[in-house]
């Protein structure tokens, strides 16, 4: 089954304790992205990757890091989490170059709800 | 700058009645427009898109959307609402060559039995 898988689904942590949220897709998509969802703000892009070893900042990158060493994986790293990073996070992927009729569609993971105390 | 507006935080409709969820956009160039739906504790699911062609776009679960260039709108519609349609709906526009989606703030659709 084609899917984007995020782990963990729920995470409670404390300020300053490094964490990683994993994201993996099995659709051979070139493009991957991280969003955060906050009430009244919709989804905002944190980082994106157009392909392996190519990453770039989105609209709200402060406090986050990403890497894209393999095509299928795109982990989100919070080196020193703070309470303002409490949010619902989504990973997404798409195939803008070779996806045919689906190339403009982004597929989302189920989300990771993070609470930073 | 590209942007999307969803003027209603919540839309209430009775089951069996038609529903409309509003979206307006601001883009430079031709817009790529999308609707996504989010059910509780789930990720976003693609409903439909407008790239080019017919202004009326049909999508999943009986939803459709009408692209109106002069009014810069892309309203989501369904002729007969179901209780199971109750969810959070997001309109989005693709932001340039980066493939980024720019989302509206979302509209909660509540369908009463």
Image (tube, coloured by chain):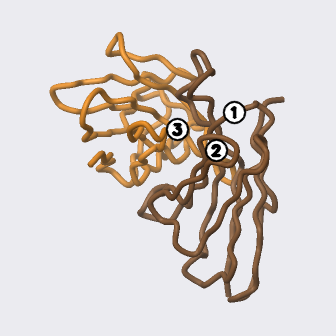
Chain colours: A brown, B orange
Q: Is residue B25 positioned above or below A86 on the image? A: above
Q: Position of residue A107 (x, y in %)?
A: 64, 37
Find numbered disc 3 in the image and state the secondary structure of the residue it sits on: strand
Residue nearest the observer in this picture, A85 or A52: A52
Residue B36 tag number: 3
Residue A59, percent across and down? 44, 60
The answer to whether residue B85 is left or right of residue A26 is: left
- Residue A29 is marked as 1
Residue found at x 47% / y 50%: B108
Which residue is pictured at 61% across the width and 47% down the height? Answer: A49
Which one is closest to the eye, mark 1 or mark 3? Answer: 1
Q: Which residue is found at the position 33% from the left and 50% from the top?
A: B8
Q: Which mark is residue A32?
A: 2
| Badge 2: residue crowd in 10 Å (few <14, some 14–19, many ≥20) | many
Q: Chain of mark 2?
A: A
Cβ atoms under marks 2 and 1 closer than 8 Å: yes
Whether discs 1 and 3 lie on one chain: the answer is no
Name the chain letter of the residue that bears numbered label 1: A
Subunit under mark 3: B
So how many labels did they put on this image? 3
Q: Judge the density around disc 3: few (<14), some (14-19), many (≥20) Cα neighbours within 10 Å.
A: some
**Residue found farthest to the top:** B54
| Closer-to-camera residue (A64/B32) | A64
Q: Position of residue A31 (x, y in %)?
A: 62, 39
- Residue B14 pos. (x, y %): 45, 38
Q: Nearer the viewer, residue B101 or B13?
A: B101
Q: Left or right: A115 with respect to B10?
A: right
Looking at this view, name the residue that lies furthest to the right. A1
């Amino acid at each position: 089954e084609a899917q984007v898988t995020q782990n963990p689904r729920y995470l409670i942590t404390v300020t300053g304790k490094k964490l990683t949220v994993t994201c993996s897709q099995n659709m051979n998509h070139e493009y991957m992205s991280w969003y955060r969802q906050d009430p009244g703000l919709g989804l905002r892009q944190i980082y994106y990757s157009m392909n392996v070893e190519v990453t770039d900042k989105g609209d709200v990158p402060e406090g986050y890091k990403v890497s894209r060493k393999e095509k299928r994986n795109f982990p989100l790293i919070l080196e020193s989490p703070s309470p303002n990073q409490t949010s619902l996070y989504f990973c997404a992927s798409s195939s803008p170059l070779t996806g045919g009729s689906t190339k403009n569609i982004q597929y989302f993971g189920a989300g990771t709800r993070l609470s930073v105390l | 700058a590209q942007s999307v507006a969803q003027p209603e935080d919540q839309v209430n409709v009775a089951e069996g009645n038609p529903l409309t969820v509003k979206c307006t956009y601001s883009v430079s160039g031709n817009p790529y427009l999308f609707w996504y739906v989010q059910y509780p504790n789930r990720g976003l699911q693609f409903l439909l898109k407008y790239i080019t062609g017919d202004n009326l776009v049909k999508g999943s679960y009986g939803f459709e959307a009408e692209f109106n260039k002069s009014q810069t709108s892309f309203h989501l519609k369904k002729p007969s609402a179901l209780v199971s349609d109750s969810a959070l709906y997001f309109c989005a526009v693709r932001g340039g060559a980066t493939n980024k989606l720019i989302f509206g703030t979302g509209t909660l659709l509540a369908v009463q039995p």
